Image (cartoon, rainbow, N blue to C red):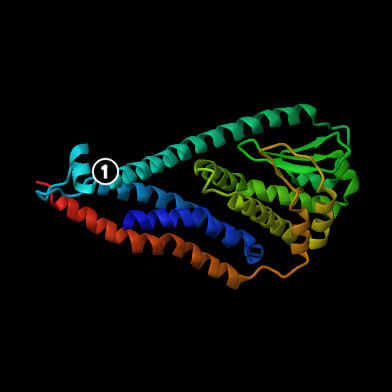
Amino acid sequence: MSALAFSLVALALVGPVPALLARATWPLRAPRAAIVLWQSIALAAVLSAFSAGIAIASRLFVPGPDGRPTATITSEIAALGLPLWLLYVVVLTLTLVVGARLVVAVLQVAIATRRRRAHHRMMVDLLSTSRFAAPDVCTRASGLRILDVEQPLAYCLPGVRSRVVVSHGTLTALSDDEIAAILSHEQAHLRARHDLVLEMFTAVHAAFPRFVRSANALDAVRLLIESLADDAAVRTSGPRPLARALVACAAGRTPRGALAAGGPTTVIRVRRLGGKPNSVVLAVVAYVAAAGVLVVPTIAVAVPWLNELTRLFAALP
């Protein structure tokens, strides 16, 4: 029953639960707490998947007729029956595959993202220009690079040698307040290392099989991270300058691996700036829910499984 419960919890946390949460509008009023909730759901899904495999592995060593745990394939089949033994082996194999895929996905995402950013950082350093006089507000942005591009765009390249990149078109199209807002937005990404949060969700998304995973979590977290950076920019420059800057940079094309001010979520974020403020009550509820997602299933399912495992090892000579 523990293995079945863990499997059902894992499937729920990678399918219907993210789908329901992604359709909700309240996370935009508590973005930080909502990200913690998404992280709890992802972590609980991974832990549940591994726990299901471990629980199933323990069932392969059920006590035989003599009361001792079965230790060979033939004795396991004799105790469980061939259909049930095959089911346990298949589910255990799938769990191990998910674990291996998670390790590989973490490494692939980390290596590919950093390689891509390093290459683009080198290109930005080579192509940046100093022939345009930057406004005084730009002097507060460390690692700033200006590209000779007329289209307004703004993005950042996180990492040890981080960069904030804006175009000449951004500096000419925006006022000083709007430039300060867009720079504050990008610097908030760099300070909070939002890129590491996205890497985790990208790796978890790649690790689960396609027939159970969805892009809801990844898309929702991208929007919430941009909302967090928007909140930091609002505290510096106010909502109006930021809204105008976001609209101006909405169509700017940015490289993969960068965190851009514009993008497909611009309309949602601009509406958010003119909507209801962030809610402390919603944030508290989200934090409590995040703790519950991790603690409640673990206690309800793991305790009976640990009791069974204790009983099994007690039967050892």
- Front residue (pair 43, 168): 43
Q: Position of residue 144 (x, y in %)?
A: 75, 39
Q: Quadrant of residue 227?
A: bottom right
Quadrant holding the N terminus: bottom left
On the question of residue 96 being in view, the answer is yes
Q: Position of residue 104 (x, y in %)?
A: 48, 35
Q: Quadrant of residue 259?
A: top right
Amino acid identity at mark 1: Leu
Q: Position of 159 compared to 250: left or right?
A: left
- Front residue (pair 292, 82): 82
Outermost bottom residue: 281
Q: Quadrant of residue 310?
A: bottom left
- Front residue (pair 204, 10): 10
Q: Position of residue 95 (x, y in %)?
A: 40, 43
Residue found 81% across the figure and 58% down from its top: 243
- Residue at the disc numbered 1: 82
The correct choice, above or below, for 122 with respect to 30 in the image is above
Q: Position of residue 300 (x, y in %)?
A: 35, 64
Q: Position of 4 compared to 215: left or right?
A: left
On the question of residue 72 being in view, the answer is no
Q: Does dot 1 land on a helix, a strand or a loop?
A: helix
Residue found 20% across the figure and 49% down from its top: 62
- At label 1, counting other C-alpha atoms closer than 10 Å, the crowd grade (few under 14, some 14-19, many 20 or more) is few
Q: Position of 283 compared to 257: left or right?
A: left
Residue found 50% across the figure and 44% down from its top: 208
